[in-house]
Image (spheres, helix red, strand yellow):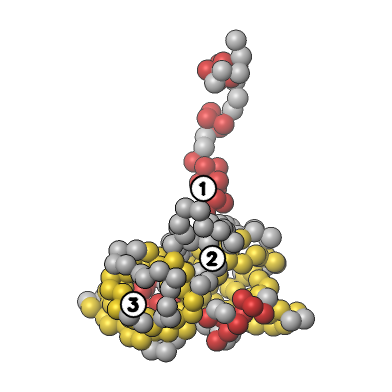
Amino acid sequence: MFTGIIQQVGALTALQRRGGAGRLTVQAGAWDSPLVPGESLAVEGVCLTVAEPAGAEIRFDVLAETLAKTNLGGKRAGAALNLERAVRAGDFLGGHLVSGHVDGPGTIRSIGRAGADRVVEVVCARELLHGIVAKGSIALSGISLTVVDLRADAFTVHIIPHTWEHTSLSRARAGDPVNLETDVIGKYVARFLETRTPASSSMTLDKLRAAGFMD
């Protein structure tokens, strides 16, 4: 589990393809405590398992599914990558709950300005938009952001200068792909509403008694 607060911006060193899957090598700075094999790290919002922490380089084995359905498969050497270690019990939750399981891709349609802030408009599929609410949370390539506007085929977020300068978005351009993860709590609520039946949702005296609300 992550929070969407980016801790480092690493750089892609190499992506080696192996029969559809691949090995990702990322250069990063020092951490407060050393990375260990088997721990989780969010890379551009994608939860990956550290295979080999080797000094300034980190290596990950990446599934073909991950390369096909996230923007990692299209990255080239030198690309900036948002990095966040998994949250630990007692850590400060500065963003929102992010699982690192990308729901789907988005594409930056435009980048504008609102005072000192950037306004980024992202186009995505309608099924993703159904899980996005205005003023709700969205993880955009691993960055915890607040949705400002919802449109027919897109949404917008405003990004303060600090976030812009300390994430991979500082190199983003219109047309770039981004990874989207909608709010995990909203997904569970939506799933519950989809699967409930009229019979299960209706309230009766027998159900109230069984639940202990009546003698």
Type of amino acid at the residue the image marks with label 2: Gly
| Percent position of residue 156, x then y | 66, 71
Q: CA distance from mark 2 to mark 3?
A: 20 Å
Res 75 visible: no
Question: In the rendering, which numbered label is found on residue 188?
Answer: 1
Look at the picture and state if 69 lies above or below 175. Answer: above
Question: In the rendering, which numbered label is found on residue 4?
Answer: 2
Please identify, in this view, whether the residue under mark 1 or under mark 3 is nearer the observer: 3
Look at the picture and state if 118 lies above or below 1. Answer: below
The residue closer to the viewer here, 81 or 92, is 92
Q: Residue furthest right?
A: 115
Question: In the rendering, which numbered label is found on residue 58?
Answer: 3
Instruction: Report helix, strand or loop for mark 3.
Output: strand
Which image quadrant is residue 72 in?
bottom left
Q: CA distance from mark 1 to mark 3?
A: 33 Å
Q: Residue furthest bottom?
A: 78
Instruction: Report helix, strand or loop for mark 1.
Output: helix
Type of amino acid at the residue the image marks with label 1: Tyr
Which image quadrant is residue 101 in?
bottom left
| Percent position of residue 9, x then y | 49, 79
The structure residue drawn at horizontal position 61% and vertical position 76%, both measured from the top left corner, is 163
The residue closer to the viewer here, 200 or 184, is 184
Callout 1–callout 3 Cβ contact below 8 Å: no
Q: Earlier in the sequence, mark 1 or mark 2?
A: 2
- Local crowd at mark 1 within 10 Å, few (<14), some, or many (≥20)? few
Type of amino acid at the residue the image marks with label 3: Ile
Q: Earlier in the sequence, mark 1 or mark 3?
A: 3
Callout 2–callout 3 Cβ contact below 8 Å: no
| Percent position of residue 175, x then y | 55, 84
